[in-house]
Every structure is written in structure tokens, then in C-alpha cells.
């Protein structure tokens, strides 16, 4: 006989992944990952985790390839350090950006925030990739930080909308990361209208007399 008396509802259960918003997070690791669209462009990804979640919560496996591995005690997420990738390029205003130098500046900002700049300055590596690996070890399991997480919507092949998470741009007045005991908080307050880049779907217009040699009815962007 089927009966629902002992079946618990999943409604309201805590998801194992974080989303956009203001969060208290620690860094589990940092990766410097090549983008799929440009082999010379890279993203700095912060692999973060919340404080342990109480109650009935099942976090992701720490090793997804090993079903017997431990599970994360908190929600986890991958957050890009910047909305834009790190690459060598010249901006329309003539400013030249250098990938490796920009990545170093990002690590300096993170170290200054955590108060471990001296430890960061002790790292010496032959390549930027070795340097970022060393940074991952340095920042691993460091103190919890207050963070503002923004996101960009994208649609997967199944038609579901997901969020690509990133830190919003900092300024002199506001910062996306700060310590929990900051004397004067300058943390960016999450604003859905400002900090979520919505997916814009283009409509396809059909023309009966369209020449088959013409381009497609939509442009990739």
C-alpha cells in the first residue's frame, strides 16, 4: 500500500549551491581557467563555500568522481573574480591591458583585503599559471569574507536559465569583498536590477521571399 504519511517534503530545503546576493564565504581554492572562446583569455575563479548549513542539508561531494568522499558542509559556488576575462587587449579609449599584470593586481587586492600581502609578496614563480597555483594554496581556507555576488543569465541546451556568477566591479566608494570586522563597511549591497544581467532572446523574423543565400535571421552575440 502506498501512503505519504512518512514522506518528507523537499519544499524549502536549502540548495547545495549559492546564488547571487550578499554572502559570507570562504575561499576553498582559486583556479586560472582558459575560456572556451579564446585560448589566450582566462578567468580567475574563486571556489567558495558558505558557513556550515544546519538542519537537513546535503552538500555536494568534495570529489564528484568519488561517491564515498566527504560532502561540503556549506553551500558552494564558482565565482569569477571579474565579469570580464583576463587577456591582452587595447580598449577603445586606448588603454592597454595585460593579462598577467591584471591577474597579479587581482591577487594583490584579495591579499590586501585579507591582510596577508606580505605572504603574497613572498611567492615567486616562473609562469603566471604556477603563480596562480601558489595563490590557491595561500588563500585556501582563509577567513570568511563578506561578498557581493552578481550574475549573468545564460540558457543551457535543455532550455533552462542558469547564472554565471561574478564579483561586481569595485570602486573607491564600494567593494565586492571585505572582512567581517571591517570598521567602516563599503561592501556593495546586492541590487537585483543592477547585479543580474538578464538573458535577452532575439526574435526570428521570417520572410517568404528570403534568398537562400542570405545570412541567418539572427546574429550571434
Image (cartoon, rainbow, N blue to C red):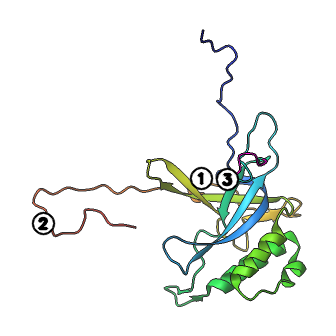
Q: Position of residue 30 (x, y in %)?
A: 73, 68
Q: Which residue is mark 3?
A: 65
Residue 115 relative to residue 215: left or right: right
- Depth check, mark 3 against mark 2: the one in front is 3
Residue 201 relative to residue 89: left or right: left
For the residue labelled by badge 2, is the local secondary structure a helix, a strand or a loop?
A: loop
Name the residue rendered at 68%, 86% in the picture: 101
Relative vertical location of residue 196 with respect to residue 91 in this rendering, above or below: above
Q: Is residue 67 magenta?
A: yes
**Who comes first in sequence, dot 3 or dot 1?**
3
Q: Which residue is mark 1?
A: 192
Sort mark 2 into few (<14), some (14-19) or many (20+) by Cα contacts within 10 Å.
Answer: few
Q: Is residue 84 magenta?
A: no
Which residue range is magenta in the image?
Answer: 66-70
**Who comes first in sequence, dot 1 or dot 2?**
1
**Who comes first in sequence, dot 3 or dot 2?**
3
In depth, the one of 43 and 207 nearer the eye is: 43
Asked if residue 4 shows in the view, the reply is yes
If the image is split into quadrants, where does the N terminus sit?
A: top right
Q: Position of residue 17 (x, y in %)?
A: 67, 48
As drawn, the label of residue 216 is none
Q: Position of residue 104 (x, y in %)?
A: 73, 82
**Outermost left residue:** 209
Q: Which residue is mark 2?
A: 211
Q: Position of residue 78 (x, y in %)?
A: 66, 59
Amino acid at each position: 500500500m502506498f501512503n505519504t504519511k512518512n514522506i518528507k517534503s523537499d519544499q524549502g530545503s536549502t540548495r547545495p549551491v549559492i546564488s547571487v546576493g550578499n554572502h559570507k564565504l570562504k575561499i576553498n581554492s582559486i583556479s586560472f581557467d582558459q575560456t572556451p572562446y579564446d585560448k589566450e583569455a582566462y578567468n580567475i575563479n574563486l571556489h567558495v563555500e558558505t558557513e556550515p548549513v544546519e538542519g537537513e542539508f546535503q552538500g555536494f561531494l568534495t570529489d564528484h568522481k568519488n561517491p564515498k568522499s566527504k560532502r561540503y558542509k556549506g553551500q558552494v559556488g564558482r565565482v569569477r573574480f571579474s565579469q570580464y576575462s583576463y587577456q591582452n587587449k587595447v580598449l577603445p579609449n586606448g588603454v592597454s591591458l595585460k593579462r598577467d599584470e591584471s591577474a597579479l593586481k587581482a591577487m594583490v587586492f584579495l591579499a590586501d583585503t585579507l591582510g596577508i600581502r606580505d605572504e603574497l609578496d613572498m611567492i615567486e614563480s616562473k609562469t603566471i599559471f604556477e603563480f596562480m597555483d601558489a595563490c590557491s594554496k595561500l588563500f585556501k581556507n582563509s577567513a570568511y569574507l563578506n561578498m557581493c555576488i552578481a550574475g549573468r543569465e545564460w540558457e543551457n541546451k535543455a532550455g533552462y536559465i542558469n547564472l554565471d556568477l561574478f564579483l561586481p566591479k569595485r570602486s573607491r566608494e564600494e567593494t565586492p569583498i571585505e572582512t567581517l570586522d571591517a570598521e567602516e563597511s563599503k561592501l556593495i549591497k546586492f541590487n537585483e536590477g543592477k547585479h543580474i544581467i538578464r538573458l535577452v532572446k532575439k526574435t526570428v523574423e521570417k520572410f517568404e521571399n528570403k534568398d537562400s543565400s542570405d545570412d541567418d535571421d539572427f546574429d550571434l552575440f
